[in-house]
Image (cartoon, grey):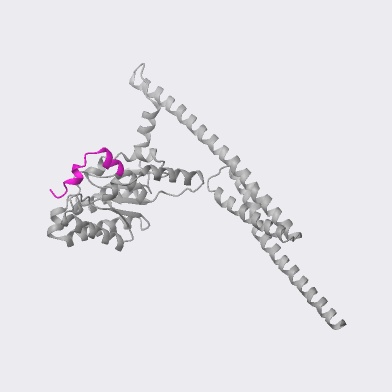
Amino acid sequence: MRYYVDKIKTQKFRSVKKMEIAHLFEATMLICFGFSWPLNVIKAYRARTAKGTSLPFIILIITGYIAGITAKLINKQYNYVLAVYFLNLAIVMTNIFVYIRNKALDKKAVANDVNDAIKSIQVENIAEAKEDNMTNYTNSLDEFINRKTTTVEMKNSVILFGGSLDKKIPVAELAKSFDFNFEIYNKSEDSLSVSDCGKYFQNKIAALQPEGILIHIGDKDYNLFKNDSTSFDNAYLNLISGVKAVNKKCRIALVSVNNPNNDKTLALMNAHIKAIADSENAAYINLENAKLWNPEATKAASEFAYEMGLKIRKPLRDVAEILYSYAYRNFDTKPLDSMAG
């Protein structure tokens, strides 16, 4: 009998010892995970900006710690591991207070920048007035800002590259309305064909080294494609090669030629464009869906993502949805409906 009692005691001792070792390793894991958070708090506090800090990520970590603490309480494991959980949770939550403080500093910095810009513009306004010997002449803040910002185009922007229809799309106004978090420029040209678009890209766009480009070419190439589809394909592929030569990581989206009358040649042309997009790992945008697109829904989604701290660039498909649904609703669609002419 004593033998079995001793055996049970030995097994219980070993079980307790194993549990203690397991708790020790768990505590070690928590310490290793938690050690970086004080450094992160100090770094964020000194940075004085919320840029680069993801609030959803911090909340996710806090949720994980709360789940771990809850599991410990349910199992009534009141030990030093639970204390480590609480310590880590407190440190991570400190990041939220630092984030709120840094967001306030960011807003204050933006306000100061605006005030500085206004003062600078006022000084420039006075200087120009004296130089021109003009009195009672004022320019609006918007006029000065627009004159400054439109003179210099930024690299790593998104480009709309198409023909006469695309050229009329007010990309700057739409980008502002839908809160694009990147620069976008309209580099479309009237009567641009696939044969000369490669040269036009090199002369007018390549220097900007775009990080994204929407290509809408083909409405002037009906006869070329009908007579020699191989030349059409090669010209299109040469354009894409030129884009990738400038920036191999450039996001590319190919927009279909509108075909409201189900013209067989245009349908085949779009099939070729889609095949080119697939072969070049580019997105394919079917323009025939423009009637069904709802850019307001895209706007709401992007605003939610921005508020959650997700500073992502809007997918080119969403950009196309906004630009071409606007064109379809506000412009005469005859240029779209007469491509075979």
**Res 164 seen here:** yes
Q: Is residue 110 left or right of residue 196?
A: right
Q: Residue furthest front?
A: 1
The reply to whether the magenta stretch includes residue 336 is: yes
**Res 210 seen here:** no
Magenta stretch?
A: 325-341
- Residue 5 placement: quadrant: bottom right
Residue 62 location in percent, x, y?
A: 62, 52
The reply to whether the magenta stretch includes residue 120 is: no
Q: Residue furthest top?
A: 135
- Residue 88 placement: quadrant: bottom right
Residue 302 location in percent, x, y?
A: 44, 45
Quadrant including the N terminus: bottom right
Tell me the residue at 20%/45% (across/down): 336
Tell me the residue at 38%/42% (across/down): 296
- Residue 242 placement: quadrant: bottom left
Residue 220 location in percent, x, y?
A: 17, 50
Q: Is residue 311 left or right of residue 328?
A: right
Q: How many marks?
A: 0
Of residues 200 and 186, the one nearer the viewer is: 186
Residue 314 location in percent, x, y?
A: 40, 48
Of residues 163 and 45, the one nearer the viewer is: 163
Tell me the residue at 28%/57% (across/down): 240
Q: Residue furthest right?
A: 2
Work out whether 77 lies above or below 217. Answer: below
